[in-house]
Image (cartoon, grey):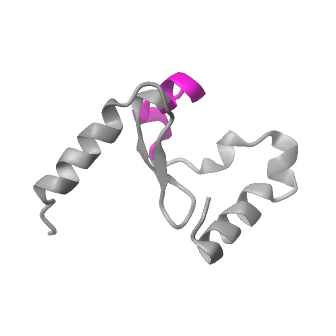
Amino acid sequence: MRTESLTDIAYRHFVESVKDYAIYMLNIDGTVATWNEGALRAKGYLREEIVGQSFGVFYSEAEQKNGLPERNLNIALKTREV
């Protein structure tokens, strides 16, 4: 098991406490990995509700049907940019 460094722990606590900006990370499969207070305010999902879910829920039904979440995820994986 990997042990988190103090820097990693401090960073995680800092990000989680930010309230004015939505900050979250995705796993490479597009599932939500982290969720902060700002994301809760912006999107309305509690951390317990959204972590582990597909980021596709942030897209409209039409965008989901057209495969936009998957295309955007593939672009982000290839370019390493969001």
Give the main secondary structure, helix, strand or loop, of the magenta stretch: helix
Total tally of numbered discs in the picture: 0
Image point 53% across, 47% down: which residue?
53
Side (left or right) of 2 relative to 69: left
Magenta region includes residue 33? no
Side (left or right) of 78 relative to 69: left
Image point 76% across, 65% down: which residue?
71
Residue 38 image offset from top left, x and y in percent: 46, 28
| 7, above or below 15, in the image | below
Side (left or right) of 42 relative to 4: right
Residue 16 image offset from top left, x and y in percent: 33, 36
| Quadrant showing the C terminus | bottom right
| 26, above or below 1, in the image | above
Magenta region includes residue 49? yes
Residue 44 image offset from top left, x and y in percent: 56, 24
Q: Which residues are magenta?
A: 39-51
Q: Nearer the viewer, residue 25 or 18?
A: 18
- Does residue 44 appear anywhere in the picture? no
Q: Nearer the viewer, residue 45 or 79?
A: 79
Side (left or right) of 41 relative to 63: left
| 75, above or below 30, in the image | below
Image point 84% across, 48% down: which residue?
63
| Quadrant showing the N terminus | bottom left
Residue 45 image offset from top left, x and y in percent: 52, 29
Q: Residue furthest bottom?
A: 78
